[in-house]
Image (cartoon, rainbow, N blue to C red):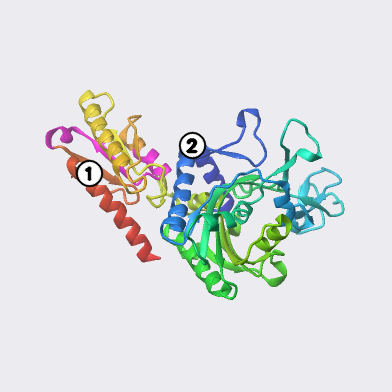
Amino acid sequence: MFHNDLMAKIVSLCKRRGFIYPSSEIYGGFGSCYDYGPLGVELKNNIKNEWWKEMTRRHEDIVGLDAAILMSPKVWQASGHLTAGFADPLVECKKCHHRFRKDHLKEEKCPDCGGDLTKEKKFNLMMKTFVGPVEDEASVAYLRAETCQGIYVNYKNVLDSTRLKIPFGIAQIGKAFRNEITPGNFTYRMREFEQMEMQFFITPGENEKWFDFWKEERMKWYLNLGIKKENLRFKEHKKEDLAHYARAGVDIEYNFPFGWNELEGIHDRGDWDLSNHAKHSGEELSFIPHIIETSAGADRSALAFLVESYREEEKRVYLNLAPVLTPYKVAVFPLLANKSQLVEKAKEVYKMLKISDVKSQMSNVFTVAWDDRGNIGKRYYSQDEIGTPFCITVDFQTLEDDTVTIRDRDIMKQERVRVGELINYLTDKFYDFSRNLQCSR
């Protein structure tokens, strides 16, 4: 399968099955912005939930935060985002007037029409807005370009209001905005995106230990959720390529259809951020720790999991997603939609699983879909295409012995299980899948 062909198929599946839509599509769309549909929002929420559990539940020394998107412009002045340091090199074609990042071009000519390019100039990526009734310089504000600054300006608040001691971390999931010159590759590079960031505060001198620790921890997270080792790699930042604030940096890259690209960055930020905020704000910080940052993209992760799980066979397409990520864990069908006894019994099974979902302490274990459209084969393939791990069919034998058929998404094998044993059966299946996946990585 050609890579460009694969990407086109992913985009088509996302639109057709309700994962991701072009934003404002009825008005012709809005450049490089996308809306997550009913299944897409479930997938991305599951990814975020797994990240949140990994950071704040499985590590006793990490707490959460949800900082405001709008902050004082002084924050961005202190962080360096309003200077040339947070700008991309912009060139424009003199003929077709398309604009490009100079560092993304392989030649000195326009890639679209071959025309000559203007001289390079710096383009700041911050998105400007106004707060208040008057649009003047005094009311200028910015949509945050990254979520970590909200963590840094709340560092002292968290320290003062909790019993945490260094080393400890603060985790946050939230929207960020960058006025990218050349966004693209579907949801990989957008102007509005969602970050999953954790800032880990450490004693100076322990940088290398904690940098290596989080580098390996974050790689394991992707592996444990089903991405193959051969499709992931570390890319160490050369000294000359490091951000001005970073002492060390490494990217976790994924082999997308459009090439190896960053999924997550791990950075040793030293004391640059907190020192600058202490200096510009005048807030006394008696001890300024160093920071190890892990910064992942929720949208990029969702795209990577979709690409990784896409499978084609002769008669079907399916998503081999880890069950913990799938929008639905189980689908329930009546064999025939025009037989009231089958429909009634299938509804009983459906409601039983829905109730167990509410009561279960396991995250989204039995998120359940109902489907009675078309023939049973089409229903199976429809659920395959959205990644549902198990399909339960209520048939005439169910009315006799209270058993149903359960079909496995990946191997298409069916077996009969008593209705009263369904919850334990499915719980064991999901547990076995997670255990086997982690053992195989």
**Pointer 2 or 1: first along the chain:** 2
Residue 326 shown left or right of residue 24 in the figure: left
Residue 216: give its label.
Answer: none
Expressed as whole percent of the image width and height from the top left, the position of residue 373 reads 35, 29
Quarter-of-image position of residue 139:
top right
Determine the residue located farthest toward the bottom in the rendered image.
205
Quarter-of-image position of residue 403:
top left
| Nearest the eye: 8 or 19 | 19
Label 1: few (<14), some (14–19) or many (≥20) C-alpha neighbours in 10 Å = some
The mark lying in front, picked from 2 and 1, is 1
Instruction: Name the residue type under label 2.
Output: Gly
- Element on which disc 2 rests: loop
| Nearest the eye: 2 or 309 | 309
Q: Is residue 227 visible?
A: no
Residue 108 shown left or right of residue 404 in the figure: right
Instruction: Name the residue type under label 1.
Output: Leu
Give the distance between the C-alpha atoms of the residues marked 2 and 1, in whole angstroms. 28 Å
- The quadrant of the rendering that contains the C terminus is bottom left
Expressed as whole percent of the image width and height from the top left, the position of residue 64 reads 50, 52
Give the residue pinned by disc 1: 422
Give the residue pinned by disc 2: 18
Expressed as whole percent of the image width and height from the top left, the position of residue 323 reads 37, 50
Q: Is residue 64 above or below residue 237?
A: above
What residue do we see at 33% from left, 46% from top? 365
In the image, residue 394 lies in the stretch drawn in magenta: yes
Label 2: few (<14), some (14–19) or many (≥20) C-alpha neighbours in 10 Å = some
Expressed as whole percent of the image width and height from the top left, the position of residue 340 reads 23, 23
| Nearest the eye: 288 or 428 | 288
Q: Which residues are magenta?
A: 380-401
Q: Is residue 159 above or below residue 194?
A: below
